[in-house]
Amino acid sequence: MINKNLVTLKANYLADTMQSELIKKTIWSNVSIVSYNIPLLAMLSIYENISLPLQYFENVKQKDAENIVLNMLKKYNMAHAMYYKPKKLNEFELLIVKYLRASIRKPKHIFFFLPHRMLLTDDYSPFIHFIKDINSADVTVVENYRYFDEYKNLEFKEIPYNSWQTLVLKI
């Protein structure tokens, strides 16, 4: 069963603190991060950005990585953008690419930090639809309390900031 959580914050700087704590765990654990603070590499193609963790950590051959990334992009109707540079994509497409990069190693848990900063729009409906359809990993969205209403129709468990590590990561 996939768990979906929402951690609401009174101040955005708390997300940075939380993210710093979590980054220490990502290399050695089964956790990935999608964040405005973790950019795509501008000089690499979308394919290269997504496949980099797979090729680095798992030594997957380039041809195999290309097939994996192509299938991932097809799921979001983005196969045409495989060899684009990130600057050719809109904010929502960039968020999807960051998610694909975070999910390529099949982590147990994916954190989205302050998605409103990645979208740069008042229309959250594409992101809400997108996040609702994720079913391959546990998901936690860390968001400012001002955006809480955007998530009210989702079946997310609200987690208080001061207990997120205990409740979400079970540490």
Image: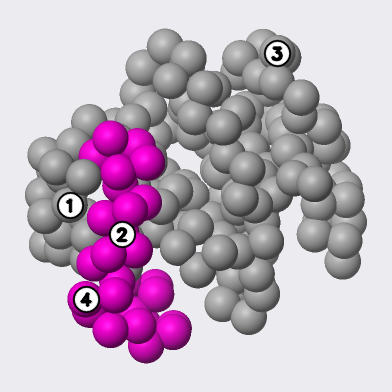
| Closer to viewer: mark 4 or mark 1 | 4
Determine the CA span between mark 1 and mark 2.
8 Å
Q: Earlier in the sequence, mark 3 or mark 2?
A: 2
Badge 3 marks a residue whose secondary structure is loop
| Closer to viewer: mark 3 or mark 2 | 2
- Point out residue 105 in the picture as x, y percentages from the top left corner: 50, 68
- Point out residue 134 in the picture as x, y percentages from the top left corner: 58, 39
Q: Which residues are magenta?
A: 52-78
Whether the magenta-drawn stretch holds residue 74 is answered as: yes
Residue bearing the label numbered 1 = 82
Residue bearing the label numbered 3 = 153
| Closer to viewer: mark 1 or mark 3 | 1
Q: Could you tell me which residue is drawn at 22 percent across and 60 percent down?
A: 47
Determine the CA span between mark 3 and mark 2.
31 Å
Residue bearing the label numbered 2 = 69
Residue type for callout 2: Val
Q: Which mark is residue 29?
A: none
Q: Earlier in the sequence, mark 4 or mark 1?
A: 4
Q: Are marks 1 and 3 in contact (CB under 8 Å)?
A: no
Count neighbours of disc 4 (C-alpha within 10 A) and say few if under 14, some if 14 to 19, many if 20 or more: few
Residue bearing the label numbered 4 = 63
Q: Could you tell me which residue is drawn at 72 percent across and 14 percent down?
A: 152
Badge 1 marks a residue whose secondary structure is loop
Q: Are marks 1 and 2 in contact (CB under 8 Å)?
A: yes
Q: Earlier in the sequence, mark 2 or mark 4?
A: 4
- Point out residue 151 in the picture as x, y percentages from the top left corner: 66, 19
Residue type for callout 3: Asn
Determine the CA span between mark 4 and mark 3.
41 Å
Where the C terminus falls, by quadrant? bottom right
Q: Could you tell me which residue is drawn at 29 percent across and 75 percent down?
A: 64
